[in-house]
Amino acid sequence: MRKLSIDDRKYVWRVYRRRSRGAFGIGAQAFMAAREGCATAPLRVLFEGAEGYPERVGLVMVCSKPPLWSNLHLPRTAEAIIRHALATVWQPENTGGACEVQDGPGFMMSLPAESKDATIRP
């Protein structure tokens, strides 16, 4: 787990491949984050199908026309995802379980313009 501080709060995060239960087993790449001390309510952002370079976990296509990519391993990308999730869908202190975003590419394309410019590339 990697560590990141945002607005004086500490978070841990990682990127991993999640196996699919489907017939083809393509799976998804996933970004996971949690506020330190609040591990019961992590954030998971899924990128189904792992389009692009499956051997390079973390490099995901967020738009196909034009092709736009994001590297989930970069701390600036992690910070943008966490900030956007906190502003829109995630309450890390909630003990009700994980917050799972199924449409990772759509979530990335909905980032504020300044975050999108810093994290998404052709």
Image: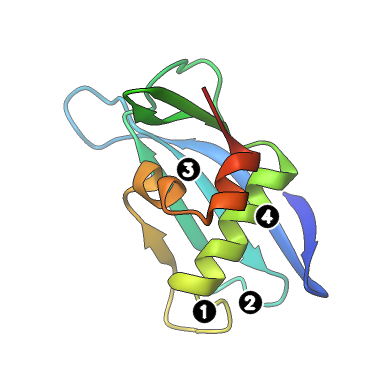
Q: Which residue type carries mark 2?
A: Cys
How far apart, in angstroms, are the residues tagged by discs 3 and 1?
Answer: 19 Å
C-beta proximity under 8 Å, tags 3 and 1: no
**Quick check: can you spot residue 41?**
no
State the CA–CA distance, disc 4 to disc 3: 15 Å
Secondary element type, mark 4: helix
Q: Label 3 neighbourhood size at 10 Å, few (<14), some (14-19), many (20+)? A: many
On the image, numbered disc 4 is attached to which residue? 79
Nearer the observer: mark 4 or 3; the answer is: 4
Residue type, mark 4 in image = Glu
Residue 56 locus on image (x, y percent): 56, 19
Q: Residue 35 versus residue 122: which sits nearer the camera?
A: 122
Residue name at image x 60 percent, y 61 percent = 82
| Residue in the foreground of this view, choosing between 62 and 94 | 62
Q: Residue 63: where, in percent of width, then height?
A: 36, 31
> Residue at point 71% right, 58% down?
12
Q: Which residue is mark 1?
A: 91
Q: Is residue 45 above or below residue 7?
A: above
Could you classify mark 2 by the number of other residues whose Cα lies within 10 Å: few (under 14), some (14-19), or many (20 or more)?
some
Identify residue for label 2: 38
Callout 3: helix, strand or loop? strand
- Write down the residue under mark 3: 30
Which of disc 1 and disc 2 is earlier in sequence?
2
Position of 59 relative to 35 (above/below):
above
Q: Earlier in the sequence, mark 4 or mark 3?
A: 3
**Left or right of residue 35, residue 102 in this image:** left
